[in-house]
Structure formats: structure tokens, C-alpha cells
Amino acid sequence: MTIDNFNFAGKKAIVRVDFNVPLDENGKITDDTRIRGALPTLKKVLADGGTLIIMSHMGKPKGKVNAKFSLSQIVDAVSAALGAPVQFAPDCAKAQEAAAALKAGEVLLLENLRFYPEEEGKPVGIDKADPAYDDAKKAMKASQKEFAKTLASYADCYVMDAFGTAHRKHASTAVIADYFDADNKMLGYLMEKEVNAVNNILKNINRPFTAIMGGSKVSTKIGIIENLMDKVDNLILCGGMTYTFAKALGGQIGQSICEDDKLQLALDIIEKAKAKGVNLVLGTDCVAADSFSNDANTQIVPANAIPEGWEGLDAGPETQKAFAAAIEPAKTILWNGPAGVFEFDNFTAGSRAIAEAIAKATANGAFSLIGGGDSVACINKFGMADQVSYISTGGGALLEAIEGKVLPGVAAICGE
């Protein structure tokens, strides 16, 4: 079932959203992007004449009630965004009466799901090394099903629209779907867009396909790199992981970040790219600094000849040209991870060059997907969000999807 084909008239819909929005010390929302992202789905329910029950998590309260993470703080903001008054249920597991009393067009927001350990389904207060852990885990899984069953009992249909948590098999993101038949559970508009964006990258590839993987550690991206090797024409590896590759190839990297236990892995990736005919683009020069600071002294040096006491903090001009040459002709582009310490204004040039090349390719008809917190922060910092095809809200969910893993929140609705 798709949300476009479903008529919510006369039905109560429980919708899992991601309203884990940042709050300041006074409990005021500092960025309402996630709330705005859910509006098309929420408004569809109301426009059809349905009743809306909204559920979300906020923060990491670890299964305990914590006022700092109460969704009561966002009721007014959600109401203003929706253009409808929002009622609040102060206990998500004891909202039966409030849900039953709702009339068509009314809205109920449930309190933070993660105030209950059953939401995440992990035993609390017991170490994994404890012999009793396995029994505690089984008991928690049984409790998780009951928790999901309770949430499901509030509504006639279920909508999953929280891509950021789709890689977790939580009560509200996956288990709850077991209590609705195929005609009464569906992905929301935001989830549909995210899933389609991933499919464009992994299944509907227009070539050439260029992927840009940045970040400090090759170890955190190895699964994604290996999955992409069978799909991409060009693979750019940048950011801090540059120096692990430079050292593996016998270079001098000064004080640059490096995973010394991953040098062989770096060499294996280089060989694998050769064997598969993938054009692997690594940095040849860098902006080196004499301290990890925006105000550090800098010099441009070869990425494999960084002086002692200096560290690479951004891609150099020749590297930027090589990146652009691999990006601009592409018809499919994935960017995850910056080329340097973009948080420092003096070390943004490499990441900006990537963003500009992506924007140019997109203007020429490429499909470009930006995903992962730092890349999204980059594109927003440069004011170029409207010059790319799609910016994912997913973070970890997006990376696991690109790695080829099944996302429980998607599989629960669509199957595997």
C-alpha cells in the first residue's frame, strides 16, 4: 500500500516520525527541519478526514523518564507547523483513552517512546558479559512485542515516516508493523523519497557514477566502500583517511591522523579498485597546518611528504582539480564525508570544491545524493542545498542502506 493510494477518511492513523529536533537550554527548537519534513505525510492524513496520532523519540533517555527529553516541549511548534491544535499524551504506553476519544481531524502527540526500554528492546542494567544477559534479552524482546501491540491498538493504520531510525528494529519502527495487515501499513512521503533516492544510487544508475567518501577513518567506511566497488566508475576517498592511504604507500604524513592498523586494508582497497576497473582518486597534495586550529600556519605540500610537526587538514589545489574532473562528467553522484576540517573556515576549500563540482554536474542532469551529517552540514554551510538533487535526513540509516544492509523499518512495510 502506498500513502497516495490510501484514504484516511474515518480512520485513526499512528505515524512514526523523527521529531528528535535540537533544543536550546530553554527547550526551544533551534532547527525544525525534521518537523517540516514530516508535514506532507501528517497533512495528508488530516486532509483525507482522518485522525492523527504522532509518535517519536527524542535524545537518548536510556529507558527512563527525563524531562530534558520530553516531547511536551515541542507541542506548540508542531501545532503551529500543522496548523491544527495538538493534544499531548504524557505517557505513550497509557494513551488508550486519549486515542479512543479522538475525533476526525484531531491530533495527538505521544510522549517520548524511549522513556520505555521496550522501544529499543535492549535489556537495561545488565552487562552483555553477564551469564543472565541472554535470558534478559529474550524477556525484553517479549516485552517489546507487547509495547508495540499497545501502540498499534490506538489506531487502524500505521505509517512509517522516520528514515533516520529505519535501520533500528525498534517497537515503533518495525515491530509494530506486525499488528497491521498489508493494506493498512505504508511508508510516509519522506520515507518514500529516501528509499527512492537510495534506489537511484544503487539500482537505477546512470553512468558515469562517482562516489565521494570522506571522513577521518577508513575503518568506519569499509563496508560502504566495498559495496560501492561493484557499482561505481569513480571512487574519491578524501578527508582524514587520505593519510592512512598515503602512509600505506610509503609516504611521510607528519602528525596527520592515521589508522596504523589499517595500512594493509588501504593497500587492499587500492588493489581491489584496480581489479574491478574503478578509477580510485586519492589526494596528491594537501593543506598542511602546524596545529589543529583555524588560525594555524599553513603550507601546501604533497600528501605523501608532510613535514614533521605538520598535519594535513584539507585537500590541496591539485587534488581539488582531480576531484572536479571525476565529479563534473558524472550522471550519478553520492557524497558522504567532507574533504577536510570544514568546521574551520580556513580549511573548507576542498569540501567547497566538491560541492561546486556536484552542483555543476547536477545542473547538467546528474542525480546527486548528499548524505551523512557532515556532508549535509557542508552543503548547508556553503548555501548550496538547492543545487543538488536530494539531501538525505538518514545519517546511519542511509549509510547502512548504501552498505547493502536491509533496513528493518523499510522491510517491515515492503518486505526484504
Image (cartoon, rainbow, N blue to C red):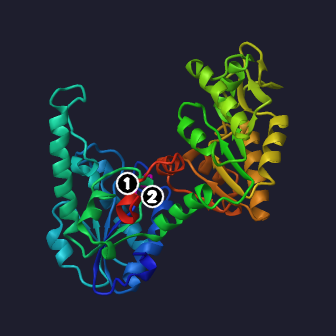
Closest to the observer, 332 or 194: 332
Q: Nearer the viewer, mark 2 or mark 1?
A: 1
Q: Amino acid at mark 1?
A: Pro
Q: Quadrant of the C terminus?
A: bottom left
Viewer-nearest residue: 360 or 178: 178
Answer whether residue 21 is magenta in the image. Answer: yes
Is 330 left or right of 413, judged from the image as shown? right
At label 1, counting other C-alpha atoms closer than 10 Å, the crowd grade (few under 14, some 14-19, many 20 or more) is many
Where residue 119 appears, as percent x and y from the top left, is 26, 52
Q: Quadrant of the N terminus?
A: bottom left
Q: What residue range appears in magenta?
A: 19-23
Residue 61 inside the magenta-drawn segment? no
Q: Residue at x 34, y 58 (%)?
A: 173
Residue located beneath label 2 in the image: 163
| Above-or-below relation of 106 to 364 | below
Residue 392 lies, with reference to residue 232, above or below; the image says below
Three-letter amino acid code at disc 2?
Phe
Q: Earlier in the sequence, mark 2 or mark 1?
A: 2
Q: Is residue 18 visible?
A: no
Residue of label 1: 408
Residue occupying the point 38% across, 62% down:
415
